[in-house]
Image: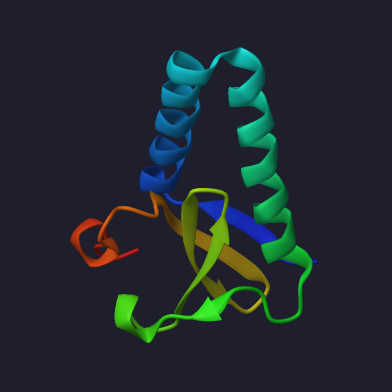
Amino acid sequence: MRRLLLSAAARRDLRSIVVYTREVWGTSQAERYRRMLEDAFERLRSDEHPGCSRPDLGAGRSSLRAGRHVVVFRIDGGVVRIVRVLHVSMVPRRHLGGD
């Protein structure tokens, strides 16, 4: 199983998603949504070919849809590097820099 690393931006994204969901939908829904995202991260660690290749987002990048969000990531050998966790309404290239 691959190791999982979240960029500082991805950690901020995750915190913001949970805070927003809690404020709008309540604590129970925020916890359910957080667990769903964490399950998606686990799929990235264990699946042979997770997500879909997204060269339009940068060399070696892929994405995986998780609820109303898109997890942007790279696989470097035995490491999954999560770059961002973006809402589907966001234009990814505006929110992606270097890893």
Q: Who's the residue at 19% across and 60% down the image?
A: 94
1 or 65, nearer to the observer? 65
Q: Who's the residue at 73% across and 55% down the image?
A: 42
The image quarter in which residue 64 lies: bottom right
The image quarter in which residue 47 lies: bottom right
> Could you tell me which quadrant the N terminus lies in?
bottom right
The image quarter in which residue 72 lies: bottom left
Q: Who's the residue at 65% across and 54% down the image?
A: 41
33 or 48, nearer to the observer? 33
> Could you tell me which quadrant the C terminus lies in?
bottom left
Location of residue 97 in the rendering, given as x and y in whole percent from the top left corner: 24, 63
Q: How is the image coloured?
A: rainbow
Location of residue 3 in the rendering, given as x and y in whole percent from the top left corner: 69, 60
Location of residue 25 in the rendering, given as x and y in whole percent from the top left corner: 52, 19
Above or below residue 23? Residue 92 is below
Above or below residue 78? Residue 31 is above
Q: Is residue 49 left or right of residue 67?
A: right
Q: Is residue 81 left or right of residue 3?
A: left
